Amino acid sequence: MTTVLSIETSCDETAVAIVNNRKVCSSIIASQIPIHTQYGGVVPEVASRQHLLIITDLIAQAIEEAGITWAEIDGIAATVAPGLVGALMIGMSAAKTLAILHDKPFLGVHHLEGHIYASYLSAPELAPPFLCLLVSGGHTSLIHVKDCGVYTELGATRDDAAGEAFDKVARMLNLGYPGGPAIDRLATQGNPTLYPLPEGNISLPGGGFHPYDSSFSGVKTAVLRLVQKLQAEGKELPVADIAASFQNSVARSLTKRAIACAIDHNLDTIAIGGGVAANRGLRATLQAAASQRNIKVLFPPMEYCTDNAAMIGCAAAEHLRRGHISPLDLGVQSRLSIMEVMSLYLSEG
Ligand code: KG4
Ligand code: ZN
């Protein structure tokens, strides 16, 4: 049994957890959304300062809630990439300090590997190989999960992430930040086929489209033009219909790519993760298409879809069991491919 204390501060959630293999002993998430809402998005300096203000209290709280002692903790982990550099620094510095103080191994975790491991938290029997559809505010990827630390990114967005597109469209419709949940709610009252919107196909030089890569800037621009046209005509904006049509376009685009990718790679399970995995339109569209093809879809509960430290601890526990630990001079990185996860570890040997 491997017990890890893990910290996640890559963006606008300060989170600390204690995880025992794939079991969550405590998971505390302090969202900064109310603070960033007034700016309409995340302000990096504000995020770092806020992480710093509360991280020590959250660590104490996570240990207390788990009811464990330092002697029972086998390793200390923190997200080190990708993310906002200043924000990552706070979590990583806290983790390294605790590792030195309590003489425990330190593990620097890749944020997207954490999102992949969120699926193990809600389905501990899950085993590779499977396909992970990762759809968050910062990323949109199709990842072939082969083993711990062994990933191939088969598809990605060429521009905006899916969640970013939800947030930007929500801003055009004056729905506030973050936009995904607001669009999801409104879409239930709108007509999803009223406004046909592009599905973001990426043309290939020899003709045809890229089967797995996506683009969301086209649909975002199409919504903007539609809003401007309706406003110029002096019409009241049919906000629910626009939200439903936009959500339908994104759900169809993601579903088409995920199903094609799973079939082409002989993968019978799609695990979905990231904040957009909560979207009801996406869930319904993907579930319907997958069941026609005998593909299983795993939808983790919301608390593990959005950013949390439990998923980081779960990934770290698996690495630690395999003898992977990180050097204490490891730095943070704003960008790092999921395929380079193992560059964060030394082999214990
Ligand atoms: O995974 P996450 O918490 O943070 C990142 O790592 O980015 O994802 C946040 C994103 C935001 O863009 C938010 O608008 C979106 O997830 N989101 C949703 C829903 N809930 C959150 N998008 C669509 N429908 C939802 N229900
Ligand atoms: Zn995330």
Image (cartoon, rainbow, N blue to C red):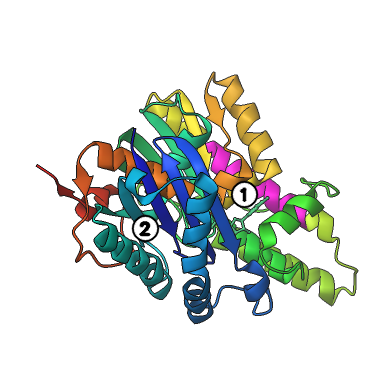
The label on residue 250 is: 1
Residue visible at 49% across and 77% down in the picture: 44
Tell which residue pokes out farthest to the left in this image: 349
Amino acid bearing label 2: Ala
User: Between 321 and 175, which is closer to the camera in this rendering?
Assistant: 321
The label on residue 78 is: 2
Question: Is 321 situated left or right of 157 in this image?
Answer: left
- Residue 88 in view here: yes
Report the magenta residues as a range.
243-258
The x and y percentages for residue 170 are 71, 65
Vertical comparison of 308 with 169: above or below:
above
Vertical comparison of 344 with 50: above or below:
above
Q: Which tag, 2 or 1, sits closer to the chain's start?
A: 2
The x and y percentages for residue 64 are 52, 52
Q: Quadrant of residue 177?
A: bottom right
Vertical comparison of 122 with 138: above or below:
above
Q: Is residue 248 magenta?
A: yes
Q: Is mark 2 within 8 Å of ligand 2?
A: no
Residue visible at 36% across and 58% down in the picture: 78
Around disc 2, counting alpha carbons within 10 Å, would you say few (fewer than 14), some (14 to 19), or many (20 or more)?
Answer: many
CB-based contact (under 8 Å), mark 2 and mark 1: no
User: Between 174 and 77, which is closer to the camera in this rendering?
Assistant: 77
